[in-house]
Amino acid sequence: MSNILSDTDLGILFRDARTHSEWLDKDVSPILLEAIYDLVKMGPTSFNCNPLRILYLTTRESRERLRPMLSRGNADKTMVAPVTAILAWDTQFYELLPKLFPHSDVRANFEGKAEHCETTGFRNSSLQGAYFIIAARAVGLDCGPMSGFDNEKVDAEFFPDGRLKSNFLCNLGYGDASKLRPRSPRLDFDEACQIL
Amino acid sequence: MSNILSDTDLGILFRDARTHSEWLDKDVSPILLEAIYDLVKMGPTSFNCNPLRILYLTTRESRERLRPMLSRGNADKTMVAPVTAILAWDTQFYELLPKLFPHSDVRANFEGKAEHCETTGFRNSSLQGAYFIIAARAVGLDCGPMSGFDNEKVDAEFFPDGRLKSNFLCNLGYGDASKLRPRSPRLDFDEACQIL
């Protein structure tokens, strides 16, 4: 594959994209929620395990159920967001491996290995959560990802059978760029990377 | 932001991109290793904490140091890859927050809270690892991400002072598409997502 993305596209995905807390009064089409997932699911995961599960809260009522679990800074901005996604993972993801990884049966890598399952599920649902952010931006949306909330209470409220665990939340909509603060600094290449 | 990416670009990033294990005989320009990071660093992280650290292994000698820690299926393909990136995270990432999150001093959220630091560092370095995969594809490279290796031994060999912890590895190069297997299935929207 020799194609590369244009500067405009890299701006949409990375350079110009910002985390938003305030939103324009513009609905998010349900078609986009499917379009995001149709991209996310193609991203790589270990053994193609795809542990991410997404619960889209598209109504004020559904988001009000979330309010008591949110940190103070996250509550109000979430209530007024057009959509909030709970990005969670299936703690029994390995049961689906015969379907997702049909080349060989790799369930024995996971069954009865709680710590390895936790690490794999958390890592790969986080990867997929990042694909989610990029995919949402790719279809024209802005994101407001958040990890400031009580995971256990969210799980008890939204996933009462105990199989799914929340990873992080992400508000979706069309951000009000006029409300953004200046961008925060990043680490330079030499501060974060080394070449051997 | 109202722009959306073209189908061609979504193919490069998600739909047509594949995990590669065999590589064309074509070097990866060092400029691309910087270009990837310049995109990765712009992706969102909690409190802009940016815990990811990247060690690029660009020589056969440096990759041979990695061989004993790799699972059988990952060893040979890594030795012949043009570049292998060790995607790691800084366990003391919060010490940099006064620089990265200058709005207020949030170090107290992390200092002395080992489990919260571990969760935050692992989640956010995983997010950044996914940005890394997408960014590499965006600049025309193919990826071979891997988590089948002995993290503790890799850390002892490459990060002996104990501050950095490996998350996952990613081979980089120009993949030999003729060696790919058919694509594995994914979960449908209704299997992975729900709308409330």
Image: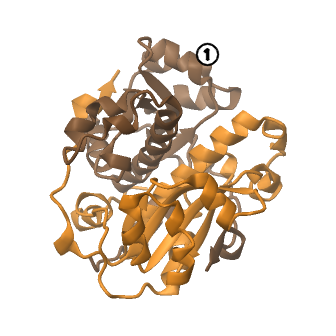
Chain colours: A brown, B orange
Q: Which of B100 and B186 is in front in this view?
A: B186
Rendered residue at 48%/61% (across/down): B70
Position of the N terminus of chain B by quadrant: bottom left
Q: Is mark 1 on a helix, strand or loop?
A: helix
Q: Which amino acid does label 1 sit on?
A: Pro
Give the image location of residue A162, x and y in percent. 45, 15
Rendered residue at 49%/82% (across/down): B60
Q: Which of B68 and B112 is in front in this view?
A: B68
Any part of residue A65 in sight: no
Residue B35, above or below A77 = below
Rendered residue at 64%/71% (across/down): A193
Residue A101 relative to residue B84: left or right: left
- Kindly identify which residue carries mark 1: A68
Residue A196 relative to residue A86: left or right: right
Give the image location of residue A125, x and y in percent. 44, 40
Residue A168 relative to residue B153: left or right: left
Q: Which of B41 and B57 is in front in this view?
A: B57
Give the image location of residue B155, x and y in percent. 65, 59
